[in-house]
Image (spheres, grey):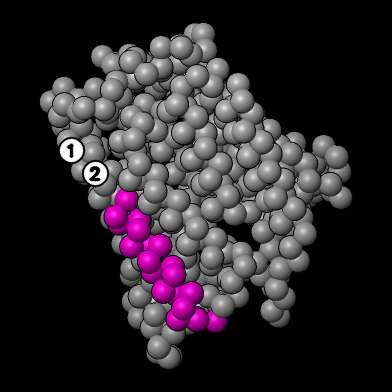
Amino acid sequence: MNRSIRVWGAFVVVHALLAWICLGMPGTGIGDYALGLPLGDVTLVYRPWIEQALSGYGVPGISEPWVYPIAALVPMLVAMVGGPDTYGVVWLILVSGLNALALALVLGRGNSPRRRAAAWWWIAFTAALGPIAVARIDAITVPLAVVALLLVAKHPRIAGILLAVTTWIKVWPAAIIGALLVASRRRWTVLAIGIVTSAVIAAAVIGAGGGAYLFSFVTEQTGRGLQIEAPVATPYLWLAALGNESSFIYYSREILTFQVAGPNVDTVALFMTPLLALAVAAIVAAGARAVRRGARMVRLLPPLILALVVTLQLFNKVGSPQFLTWLIAPIVLGIVWRGRGYAVPAGIALALAALTQVVYPYLYWRLLAADPLLIAVLTVRNIGYLVLLGWAVHAVLTADRRSDVAPVSSFDSVTMAPQPFPSAQE
C-alpha cells in the first residue's frame, strides 16, 4: 500500500507541475505568433472551434471539413462545461482524470513489481516530455488506449469499443487495432465490435448532415507539406541553418503549423504516404510471420504495437511533439507483461521525451530561427526513433524464440478481478 501511495503522490506532483506550467507560461511573442505556449492548441484552437459550434456558425466535421476525426469534438466540448474562461483548467482536469483511471488499472492492487514499474515509468515519461504530454488531443487518447490493451484479453468487446472510439478521436490507435488483428486470438471480436462502433458513429454524423465531411480528416492532411519536427524534414532544417537560400521555415495558415521549404520538398512530401504504407505493410508481414512460427501474444503484441507506432512517427509528414505520447501504451504494456525485457525501449523512450521537451515548448523559437544547436537536438531525437524502431522490429522477428523472462502468469498471480491479462499461452 505504501508503495502505491508513493506512486500516486508522484502522479499528483507531476500533473500539478505540468498544469502550473501550462497555465502560467506566457509563451514568446514573435510577430503575430505566440510561440512556446504549451496550452495554445487547447485555448487558441480547440476552444474557438467549440465556441463556433455552440454559436451556430458551423460544427467542424459536420458542416465543414476538419483535420480531426469527429469524436475529437467530444472531449473538446466537455472542456467547455465551465465556460470559455475555465476551458484550459477543465481540459487539464479531464486529462488528469483519465490518466488517473488508467493508472489505477495499471497498478491494480499494487502487489506486482512490474505493474508498479510500469506506473513509475509512465509518470517519469510524462515528466520528461513536459507540458505537451497533457496539452493536446492526443492526451485524451493515450489513457483510453492503455485501458483497452489491459482489458483486451478478458474483455475484448470493451477493448474493441474503446479502440474504435479512440481512433475516431485521433487516428494513431489504428496501429493497436492492426497489431491485435495480427497477434491476438480475440481479433475477430475486436474487429466486429470496432466495426459496429464505427458504424454507429458514422450513422450519427450522417444523421446530423455531416456525411460529406466524415473522412475530411484524411483529405485535409493529404496536401500538407513537411512539418519542421518531422524526421524527414531534418535535412531541410540543416540546409536552412547552413544558409542555403532555397531552404527556409514558414508558417502555414491553412494547417496552422510551421513547415519547411526546400529543393523537391513537395515530391518528398508526396512520397511519404506510400512509404509509410509500405513500412506498415512490412511490419505487419513480420508480425504475421511470427504468429505462424508460434509466437505467443505476450511476446509479440507489445513490440508489434511499438514498431507500428514508431513507424507512424518516423515516416509521418507531421512530427508534432505530442506524438511521443503514442509510445506510452505499448511500453506500459511491455513492462507489465515482460518486465525488465522492456528496459531498453523504456530508456530510449525517456530520452526521446526529454530531448523533445528541450525543443518544445521552451526553446521552440530558436528552432524556428534555424538554430544549429536546436536542430542538432532534434536530429539526435529523430535518430533515436530509428534506434527504437530497430529494437521493436528485432523483437517482432524474434518473438517466436524462447525467453528466460518469466511469463505473465508467474508474476501477476495476485491481481484485480477479473484478471485482465492473457495467460502465457494466449
Query: Residue drawn at (47%, 44%), measured in percent from left and top?
Result: 326
Image coords of residue 368 (percent x, y) = 55, 77
Q: Which amino acid type corresponds to the residue marked 2 in the rendered image?
A: Val
Q: Secondary structure at mark 2?
A: helix
Percent across and percent down for residue 119 are 52, 34
The amino acid beneath tag 1 is Leu
Q: Which residue is mark 1?
A: 397
In the figure, residue 327 lies in which quadrant? top left
Viewport quadrant of the N terminus: top right
Residue in view at x 38 percent, y 66 percent:
380
In which quadrant of the rendered image does the C terminus lie?
top left
Task: Please tell me which residue lies in front, 330 or 86.
Answer: 330
Look at the image and give the residue range highlighted in magenta: 369-388
Q: Residue furthest front?
A: 2
Say which of 183 and 357 sits in front.
357
Horizontal side of 410 relative to 99 (left or right) equals left
Q: Relative to residue 247, is residue 38 drawn left or right? A: right
Residue 298's label in the rendered image is: none
**Which of the 4 image quarters holds residue 35?**
bottom right
Reading the image, the residue beneath label 2 is 393
